[in-house]
Every structure is written in structure tokens, then in C-alpha cells.
Image (tube, rainbow, N blue to C red):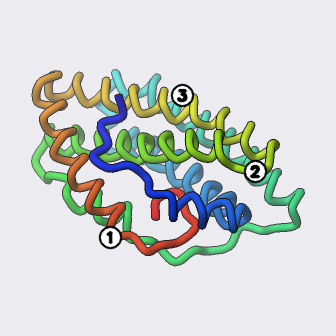
Amino acid sequence: MLSLKSRTESDWLARAVADPDAILLDHAHCERKAANNALRLLGEYPERAELVGPLCEIAREELEHFERVMAILQERGLTLVQQEPSGYQRRLFKKVRQAEPDALCDKLLVAALIEARSCERFRILGTAHPDPTLRALFLELLASEARHYAEFVRLAEGVVGREAARARLAHLAEVERRAIEAAKPLARMHA
């Protein structure tokens, strides 16, 4: 379902469980970036009325998740700080084609793959994390990530057609596999 070409290795889970604060901090950044991405797409493609409803809904939900994770960070006495980029997103967005409508298709599919990787990792954390409160949070976020993945793929199919979007998704999934393997081994959602 998620179109990923690789599975998360157990060493990632060990890093994530060993440093839950780092995962929460990183995920706050991920939620903020996801909301920004949805809004940026609306700004780049104002003529695409079919994007407005779905992207507004995604942006709202991502911001709600950002607020939720920020509240947990505050409860834990943590503040949001800048992070050194892992390089994952840069590697994916570097492969976005320039000509339209291919560029829009690729931006939507890259967003879908980022959501897919989050979804996969939330499933792992939601079943294996030792903290029951965090397990519940991760399982709740998992459902949203899966919906966002499906919505981004559906929107890309609307831009270039199902067959072309699915072929491009398979290609970008291979790029994503290489990006996740090349990312620094950190306690991050996409590293």
C-alpha cells in the first residue's frame, strides 16, 4: 500500500526508543514542514481548484499535530530547537522535474512518500515503543499519515493520470529508498 522500496531496520527503532525526546522534537519539525508544504503548494498552484480542499485539510491536520507534539514537548520540559538537516528531504525534492504538470505531480508524490515513511515508522513505534503514552500517540498519528499518503497519491493521479502517476511513484520510491539509506543514522523520523 505505501509504495516504499525498503523497510526500516531494527537499528532505527533502537535509536528512536533510546532517545524519545529527539523523535518528538524531530516530529514537531516534520509536522510544521508538512503544513508548510501543503500551503506552499496552494501558493504555487492557485489555479488548481482541486487542490484547495484536500491541501487545506492536510495543512490544518498537520498544524493540529504540531500543536499536540509541542504540548508534549513542553510537558517534558523541552523547547523546539533548530536541527541539522538529515539530507533526506533535499535528496527527494532534488529529483522533482521542472516542466509542468510533471513538477506538480512529483511534488505531490514526494509528499506522499514522506508521509509513507512516517506511516511505516509510526506503526513500528506504535507497537514497539516501551512508553504506553507515546505508543498511543504514534498509533493515532499513523492513521493520519496513511490518509495523507493516499490523498497525495490521488491528487497526483488527478494531475497526470493514474498510470503515469503510479509509474512515477515507483521511480521516486527508489529515490526515497536511496535517500533513507544515505541519511545520517540519527533518532529522526526520516534518518
Q: Earlier in the sequence, mark 2 or mark 3?
A: 3
The residue carrying mark 1 is 182
Q: CA distance from mark 2 to mark 3?
A: 32 Å
Residue 121 x %, y % = 52, 47
Task: Mark 2: give few (<14), some (14-19) or many (20+) Cα within 10 Å.
Answer: few
**Is 20 rendered above or below residue 165?**
below
- Check disc 3 and give the amino acid type: Glu
Query: Where residue 8 appears, x then y in whole percent?
Result: 43, 53
Name of the residue lying farthest toward the bottom: 84
- Where is 22 relative to 24, above or below? below
First in residue order: circle 1 vs circle 3: 3
133, 148: nearer the viewer: 133
User: Amino acid type of disc 2?
Assistant: Pro
To which residue does mark 2 refer?
Answer: 130
Closest to the camera, between mark 2 and mark 3, is 2
Please give left or right for residue 53 compared with residue 161 in the image.
Answer: right
Give the SS element for disc 3. helix
Figure quadrant of residue 62: top right
Q: Distance of mark 1 from mark 3, alpha carbons?
A: 32 Å
Which kind of residue does numbered mark 1 sit on? Ala
At mark 1, the secondary structure is helix
